[in-house]
Amino acid sequence: MMVFVWNKDDLNDEQVDAIEHDGSVFLIACPGSGKTRALTYKIALELSRLESDRHWVVAITYTHRAAEEIEERIERLGVNTERLWIGTIHSFCLDWILRPYAIYHEKLKFGFRVADERETEQRLERLCLGRQPRIRPFDCNHYFTPEGCRLEAPNPARRAQILGVLQHYWAGLEAERLIDFEMILSCAHDLIVNEPSISILLSSIFKFVLVDEFQDTKEIQYAILAAILRAGAGRTRTFLVGDPNQAIYGSLGGYAMTREDFAALCGLELADKSLSINYRSSSRIVEYFSNYRVFAADVEAEGKDRDYASLVSFDEETAHQGVDDEIVRLIRYNCEQLGIAAREVCVVGPRWVQLAALTRRLMSALPEYSFDGPGMAPFARDQNNFWFKVARMALTEPSPQLYIRRTRWAKEILVELRHIGISVRDLSERELLRRCNGIQIDQDDGLAFLRLYFDEFCLALGFELTDSSALAEHHQTFFARSEAQIAQLEGAGVQGVSAIGMFRRVFASRTGITISTIHGVKGAEFDTVIAFAMLEGMVPHFADPDGDRSAKKLLYVVCSRPRKNLHLIAETGRLDGRSLPYSTTAVLGACVFGYDEVPDDA
């Protein structure tokens, strides 16, 4: 294969400097600086440099969607991705550590299955039921470090009781040979520490390990990757990309390790590089979000919207009962007066529970607009459920645009089937796609369509649902959660929820107004962002021990998403759990800026 080359205008000087560096790189990239482009071109370059079919390039992304996007970009550049592994850290640990080396782990050696999100919820609900003092399932949210378990929001008064619930929870999982999402990392770390030969072998296979969004990486993830890099003794290099100012997953264990600390951990020299040119936002938007930097960083607006006359508004007067009306007003003004496309508008709030209800109310108030929001999918969107993976194939049409993505999904399905013992040894991704494409179902009801499709899928691959208890359990969970989701949507007055068209929309390109949490919107960009509930105790979370610092990072993320317009709302009169009114997020209230007024007749 020839070494990958790009056109002169594809990259700027900063990007070229980072990509062409002969060694490991620690790249800090400001919002809108072409971080994904730099990462994509770096992966393409290193793939083209591979000299052996035995070697791989590995890229760790924060989400499955990011992995799909990057792989598709690389394919469009004409670079073969056959020797590329790209996915989340959890998928990496499953594919490269747990499944190949489970026999060396006491909890995994007789086989294991990953419990899906619903199973975890149900088990914790049962264990929390009737406990005094009251413990709720979300009180049990936790993550693992190399030293052990940490609670997300520790309550000193209940810590012992919560850990007691978790001990019962873990014992129940072990008895049924199950591990959950967090245990994937914990078990992978156990194997890396206790079986050094694993790191040595992996480092001989991986020529390059790239990490996207390093600021959201957990300590245990750093430890796993560093062990592999250290075992390579310089043969395996790394390329880390991120922005410490956007490190908003601290409560989940994520943090931005410094270049010096990671270099010491993995035993490599890391070149210090940066991307400082923002191609996304107007100069006014860049000027505004720069107020919330925690770490010093130069950001310069140079994109096509650089000189756009942005509206930046801040509302502390609207009462919480009137927030819906104000959001409707702002949506109409942006779309109907400023000409912003609906798909380029995003409404942001701090909590999913508020957003699901808000989405349904906005759908009622703005029937002429479509919405992409939480709780609007008419079926269970659990990435770890096998039948969700099959549903993606069922609800997307074969097309050149989706070929790479659907091939990736086919590979995931085959890996899962092989892992649970279904014989698909001679089945390729392409053949699986062909068989899926041949399934024709004439059914207008979405759930009925999927039931029939899943039956035909089993028939096309030559197995029955009863051949695997795991598949049967996932099947039951998928439809139980989907039926509950549809009932909730119909109860809220949403029309046409059961129609197959609504099901297909879940995997279609973004068409409507996006509704998202701050965490969910990270990495995205829109023409207009409308953020509400910018209140102390929500932004940041009331239990955050580093409140002002976290609030700055959250606001930095929110305010760096728009290209053109930004509207911030800190409504009055919203009450907390003690019936006390929330106040404006302190660091937002303290920011001195020449805000704009949105006309009253908007």
Image (spheres, helix red, strand yellow):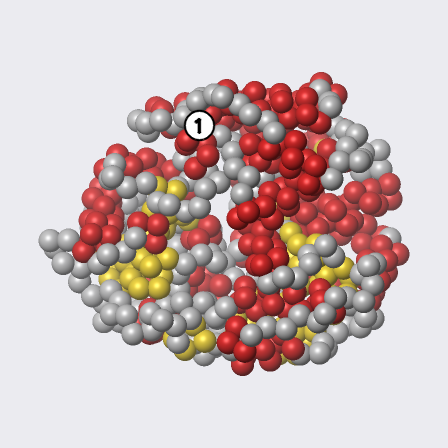
Residue 549 x, y percent position in the rendering: 45, 65
Q: Residue at 48% x, 76% y: name it.
A: 276
Q: Nearer the viewer, residue 155 or 313?
A: 313
Is residue 174 positioned above or below 269 on the image? above
Residue at horizontal 70 percent and vertical 37 percent from the top: 431
User: Height in image: 557 above or below 422?
Assistant: below
Can residue 241 be seen by looking at this rendering?
Answer: no
| 552 to 530, vertically: above or below | below
Give neighbour class at mark 1: few <14, some 14-19, many 20+ (Cα, 10 Å): some
User: Is label 1 in a helix, a strand or a loop?
Assistant: helix
Residue 408 visible, this angle: yes
Residue 288 at x, y = what percent? 33, 70
Q: Which residue is mark 1?
A: 500
Amino acid under label 1? Answer: Ile
Whole-percent x, y for residue 253 in the image: 59, 54
Residue 15 lies left or right of residue 466; in this view the side is left
